[in-house]
Image (tube, helix red, strand yellow):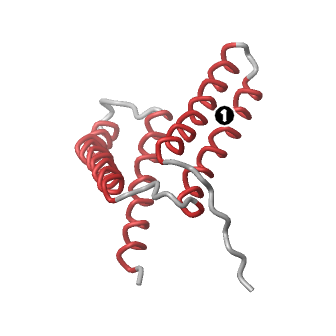
């Protein structure tokens, strides 16, 4: 026998404010932890607050009677995601190959930090490609 989810009386505005409040509390906790030299406590505060916020962000639409996410929100999300990926791709394709050539010629040294950025952007592109394939091939 399947268990039925109980409904939560949560309005859209309250939902959005709660999620952003938790993310803000997490960020503030992290900054305070850095400021008072209690980095571990700040990190724990950040992680707990953000994880709770993300659990609410992704779980509340399934248990709420009110529609918390509509077509306008989805269109805005898709536009922002596309813009983010587009900017990352344009910057990466226009800069990284030139850096490789200049590094090979001895004109520029690619530092470990820059390698980290290159790897992170490459991982983002691979993740986007995998997600795109998943969505396209999904029945």
Displayed quadrant of residue 72? bottom left
Image location of residue 20, percent across then percent down: 53, 36
Tell me which residue sits at (27%, 47%) in the image. Answer: 83
Q: Which residue is mark 1?
A: 46
Q: Residue furthest top?
A: 36
Q: Residue 61: x percent and y percent?
A: 53, 59
In the image shown, does 123 or 101 lie closer to the viewer?
123
56 on left or right of 74: right
Residue 132 located left or right of residue 98: right
Dot 1 alpha-carbon crowd within 10 angstroms: few under 14, some 14 to 19, many 20 or more? many
Image height check: is 58 above or below 40? below
For the N terminus, the image quarter is bottom right
Label 1 SS: helix
Q: Residue at x 28, y 51 (%)?
A: 79
Name which residue lies at 71% across and 32% down. 45
Determine the image quadrant of residue 46: top right
Residue 7 position, x and y percent, is 63, 62
Q: Is residue 83 left or right of residue 130?
A: left
Question: How many dots with numbers?
Answer: 1
Percent coordinates x, y for residue 57 in the rendering: 55, 50
Q: Residue at x 51, y 48 (%)?
A: 11
**Camera-nearest residue between 35 and 91:** 35
Q: Quadrant of the C terminus?
A: bottom left
Answer above or below: position of 79 versus 22.
below
């Amino acid at each position: 026998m399947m268990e039925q989810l109980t409904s939560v009386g949560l309005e859209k505005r309250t939902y959005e404010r709660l999620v952003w409040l938790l993310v803000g509390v997490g960020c503030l906790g992290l900054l305070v932890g850095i400021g008072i030299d209690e980095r571990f406590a700040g990190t724990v505060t950040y992680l707990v607050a953000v994880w709770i916020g993300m659990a609410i962000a992704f779980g509340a639409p399934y248990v709420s009677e009110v529609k918390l996410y509509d077509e306008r929100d989805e269109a805005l999300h898709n536009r922002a995601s596309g813009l983010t990926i587009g900017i990352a791709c344009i910057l990466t394709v226009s800069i990284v190959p030139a850096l490789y050539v200049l590094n090979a010629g001895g004109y520029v040294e690619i530092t470990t930090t820059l390698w980290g950025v290159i790897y992170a952007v490459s991982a983002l592109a691979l993740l986007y490609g995998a997600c795109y394939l998943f969505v396209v091939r999904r029945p």
